[in-house]
Amino acid sequence: MIFNVFKNTVLLFLLVLISCGNFSKGESKQEMITIQNPEVIVGANQTDHYLKLLEGKRVGIVANQSSVIFKDSEQNTYSHLVDSLLKLKINIVKVFSPEHGFRGKADAGELVDDSKDNKTGLSIISLHGKNRKPTTEQLKDVDVVVFDLQDVGVRFYTYLSTMHYVMEACAEANIPMIVLDRPNPNGYYIDGPVLDLTYKSFVGMHPVPLVYGMTIGEYALMINGEHWLENKLVCNLTVIRLKNYTHKTYYSLPIKPSPNLPNDKAINLYPSLDIFRGTIINVGRGTNLQMQCYGAPFFPKSDFSYIPKPNEGDKHPRFENKICYGVDLRKEPKLHKFTLKYIIDAYNKTPKSEIFFGTTFTVHAGNEILQKQIESGLTEEEIRATWQEDLENFKKIRVKYLIYK
């Protein structure tokens, strides 16, 4: 269901400028084309449900630039969760940051060092650097952990793995964890191959489909309920639920969740384009069309071309400073499923003299069969048929943990 934002006349919000700065707005800006969603109330905004769990405690927070409390119903203004809680006299002792860092600017996969916030003096501990799981030492002065990251509902988006490891560390240390839930912009469908645990990695830790149709709060409940933590530990977990949200709700993210997902179109195409990871093809990294096109210098010449250059999110993009010919997807209809048509097209356009698949493709695909299926010339329909049974089995597991219809 798309929320109605029409009041007497058609109202379209374009190019909403928002901050991706430190703990407050105004340092630097980014552009997002958004349709506002005033009806949805995120978990972070519902302080009356979790402040009492933090009072008198030493609090650790897992956060990045998307961890905000909105100040108005249209989500045009906001303050960072850390700023807001400090003003409410909550004793925050440290911040943990995921892939891309606290400010959300680091490249995909880039290791991020620990640091200190200039504004508050708080230590920022990277969970995508020396360690991906909080250590006993890092948690020794923490009584409760708050987790607030904006997920996009795709298995290889690593905030899920960060959540897994934080839950595991909290369970081992007997520390309660609070997940402030946020909507999943790809939460309205379930699709793609289910992970073969032979290929378990930081970009896929659980036997779930590529697109799993759950909020991050629901996913946390599933990690607990399916005993996926080490030694079948169970985390003392509280999920602060969303208000006015269902899995049929259209939700446009007011803050980009990571550098290479700049807008709604990129987020919608992300499952079907980041599957290219581990191939030779560029998917708009190094341009302002990240996850909205694909191409290579050896593709047939066409009217659409681009030149990848270093930018936020990719300091050394594939085919840097070379002309790439390819396919512009900005006008593609909105996807309601994961599709292989783009990667099959790219494979067919790649000369046999080029090596299309790299060694890491199977890790992102979650199996070894998908590469073989594409190489053997199977159609998308034939390939999709091979994962349907696993999808149906997953749906039976998923339903046990759904908070929202």
Image (tube, rainbow, N blue to C red):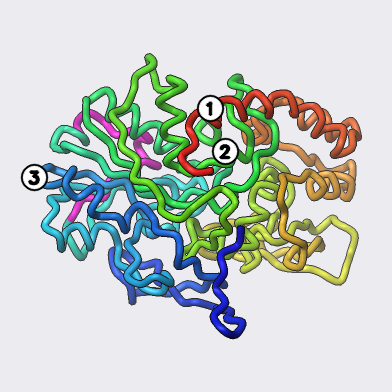
Q: Name the spot of residue 49 as percent of width and height, x first.
A: 25, 49
Q: The magenta stretch spans which residues? A: 122-137
Query: With 363 as the anchor, is 223 left or right in this view?
Result: left
Residue at 72% x, 59% y: name it.
Answer: 334
**Viewer-nearest of discs 1 and 3:** 3
Mark 2–mark 3 CB contact (< 8 Å): no
Report how far apart the C-alphas of labels 2 and 3 lie in the structure.
Answer: 36 Å
Q: Name the spot of residue 260 as percent of width and height, x first.
A: 56, 58
Q: Quadrant of residue 236?
A: top left
Mark 2–mark 1 CB contact (< 8 Å): yes
If you read the primary sequence from the N terminus, does the residue marked by circle 2 or circle 1 appear first? 2
Report how far apart the C-alphas of labels 2 and 1 lie in the structure.
Answer: 8 Å
Residue at 49% x, 77% y: name it.
Answer: 16
**Viewer-nearest of discs 2 and 3:** 3
Labelled disc at residue 56: 3
Q: Name the spot of residue 360 as percent of width and height, x first.
A: 64, 34
Labelled disc at residue 155: 2
Judged from this view, the residue extending furthest toward the bottom is 9
Q: Name the spot of residue 296 as percent of width and height, x first.
A: 78, 56
Residue type indicated by callout 1: His
Disc 2 is placed on an element classified as loop
Q: Residues within 10 Å of mark 2 (few under 14, many from 20)?
A: many
Report how far apart the C-alphas of labels 1 and 3 lie in the structure.
Answer: 35 Å
Per the image, the residue denoted by label 1 is: 206
Asked whether 147 or 129 is in front, the reply is 147
Which quadrant of the rendered structure holds the N terminus? bottom right
Which quadrant of the rendered structure holds the C terminus? top right
Quick check: 2 above or below 97?
below
Residue at 40% x, 26% y: name it.
Answer: 224
Disc 1 is placed on an element classified as loop
Q: Residue 310: in sight, yes or no? A: no
Per the image, is 366 magenta?
no
